[in-house]
Image (cartoon, rainbow, N blue to C red):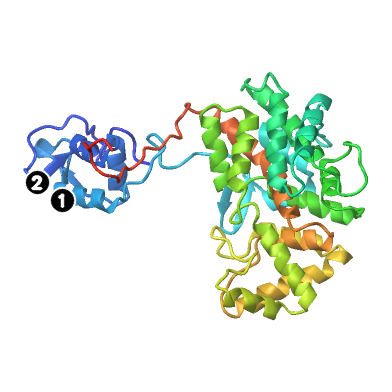
């Protein structure tokens, strides 16, 4: 990022000396014409979007007026969050087909630790073995009552959003944004979201590890240890994934100093769509279709014939295989009940690879888990949302230390120019 207030030669650019050529503009004039700050002009230079040269006397920079006008017409001005075009974060790094939480390989964390342990470590930097999250009884009662009042056809994200709102109303201290208070909220909110969901089978007490309680909300089947570990691994793998749409929404809310419940609600709102959190449901239905028809080729052909993408394949951040899918597939291989769904997923990947080099992503791996455990198609969405809540909290903790309202871009107006007659 170009240092604020300096030109590409390192001299201060605010004090433009001498009169520039008639067809040259000063930094301040360019900034006014483009509707940006002077430091953003220098950012355009560093990206090659504008060229500059020394002003008369060798001080400051000047810019070609025609080039500036062309940039304005093309509408290439990048929306910036204050003076920034990128959001600094120390939560997740994605590089070379791997991803890391706080510099540690996320797939290795999923192999060795439970969800609550990794979430708490991500927030605090301290690993506490055996840590458990529990919901206050008053908060849980309010959340359950709110969820129970929803129509029967309500989706999982609907229930989680309502539970988060009810939990917020039950917490009069929710506006305390000190780190300790936010951590306390997070450790209560996540189990509230899980325990407020209606049980899939017989009623279970809200005790024990969070993954087991979530399992009982997704299927009536009693889990073996391998299945439970697969679910818990999926939860760890899904905690965060850099600035996905829902995480950006959560950070914007935190930038406005929304309390943690509202931050999570913002993330859930952005996640509620087929291109983000609900993508695993599409993959689930596809796998179920493959198992019913006995042919991955026929199902893939139907998707391609209809002009639809094959669900569960490809990810724009991974040119190769999605490491989350690889890690979860490895877990699922130890579960006999998952063998057919796992084989179907690999058939889908192999069939599609004949025409396009796409690898399985985490949505397809989630679908294998949900299909093999007799979970509904929306189960992957629930796992995704509950898991990602820990990541949203981690980003909120970061954002609360930044300048308030810094994530407020300026709009680029392209409507009729005023003055216009009164309608």
Q: Residue at the front extreme?
A: 423
Residue 394 visible to the viewer: no
Residue sitting nearer the eye, 285 or 243: 285
Whole-Å distance between the Cαs marked 1 and 2? 8 Å
Which residue matches tag 2?
23
Q: Position of residue 141 (x, y in %)?
A: 82, 29
Q: Residue at x 48, y 40 (%)?
A: 87
Residue at x 24% of width, y 51% of height = 73
- Residue 239 horizontal/vertical position (percent): 68, 45
Q: Nearer the viewer, residue 74 or 59?
A: 74
Counting residues from the N terminus, which is met first, the one under dot 1 or under dot 2? 2
Which quadrant, please, contains the N terminus?
A: top left
Task: State the SS at label 1.
Answer: helix
Find residue 292 and report its horizontal and vertical position in percent: 79, 74
Is 123 left, or right, of 419 in this rendering? Answer: right
**Numbered disc 2: secondary structure:** loop
Can see residue 39? yes
Check if mark 1's residue and mark 2's residue have beta carbons within 8 Å. yes
Answer above or below: position of 123 versus 373.
above
x 65%, y 76%: residue: 300
Q: Is residue 292 left or right of residue 65?
A: right
Residue that label 1 marks: 66
């Amino acid at each position: 990022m170009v240092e604020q207030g300096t030109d590409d030669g390192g001299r201060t650019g605010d004090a433009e000396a001498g009169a520039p050529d008639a067809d040259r503009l000063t930094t301040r004039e360019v900034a006014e014409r483009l509707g940006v700050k002077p430091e953003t002009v220098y950012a355009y230079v560093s990206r090659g979007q504008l060229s500059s040269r020394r002003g008369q006397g060798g001080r400051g920079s000047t810019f070609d007026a025609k080039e500036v006008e062309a940039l304005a017409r093309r509408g290439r001005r990048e929306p910036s969050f204050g003076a920034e075009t990128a959001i600094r974060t120390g939560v997740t790094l994605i590089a070379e087909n791997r991803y890391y939480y706080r510099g540690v390989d996320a797939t290795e964390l999923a192999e060795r630790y439970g969800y609550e342990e990794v979430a708490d470590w991500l927030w605090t930097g301290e690993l506490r073995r055996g840590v458990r999250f529990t919901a206050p009884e008053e908060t849980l009662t309010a959340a359950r009552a709110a969820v129970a009042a929803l129509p029967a056809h309500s989706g999982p994200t609907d229930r989680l959003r309502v539970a988060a709102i009810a939990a917020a109303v039950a917490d009069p201290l929710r506006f305390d944004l000190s780190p300790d208070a936010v951590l306390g909220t997070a450790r209560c909110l996540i189990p509230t979201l899980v325990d407020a969901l209606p049980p899939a089978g017989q009623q279970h007490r809200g005790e024990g590890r969070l993954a087991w309680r979530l399992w009982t909300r997704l299927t009536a089947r009693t889990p073996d240890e391998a299945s439970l570990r697969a679910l818990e691994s999926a939860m760890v793998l899904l905690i965060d994934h850099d600035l996905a749409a829902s995480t950006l929404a959560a950070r914007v809310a935190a930038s406005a100093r929304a309390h943690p419940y509202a931050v999570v609600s913002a993330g859930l709102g952005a996640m509620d769509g087929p291109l983000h959190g609900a993508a695993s449901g599409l993959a689930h239905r596809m796998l179920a279709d493959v198992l019913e028809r006995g042919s991955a080729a026929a199902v893939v052909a139907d998707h391609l014939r209809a002009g639809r993408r094959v669900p569960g394949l490809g990810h724009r951040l991974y040119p190769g295989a999605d490491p989350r899918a690889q890690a979860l597939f490895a877990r699922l291989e130890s579960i006999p009940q998952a063998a057919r769904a796992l084989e179907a997923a690999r058939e889908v990947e192999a069939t599609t690879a004949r025409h396009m080099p796409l690898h399985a992503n985490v949505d397809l791996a989630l679908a294998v888990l949900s299909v093999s455990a007799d979970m509904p198609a929306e189960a992957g969405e629930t796992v995704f949302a509950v898991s990602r809540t820990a990541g949203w909290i981690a980003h909120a903790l970061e954002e609360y230390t930044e300048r308030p309202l810094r994530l407020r871009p300026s709009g680029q107006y392209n409507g009729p120019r005023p003055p216009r007659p009164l309608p």
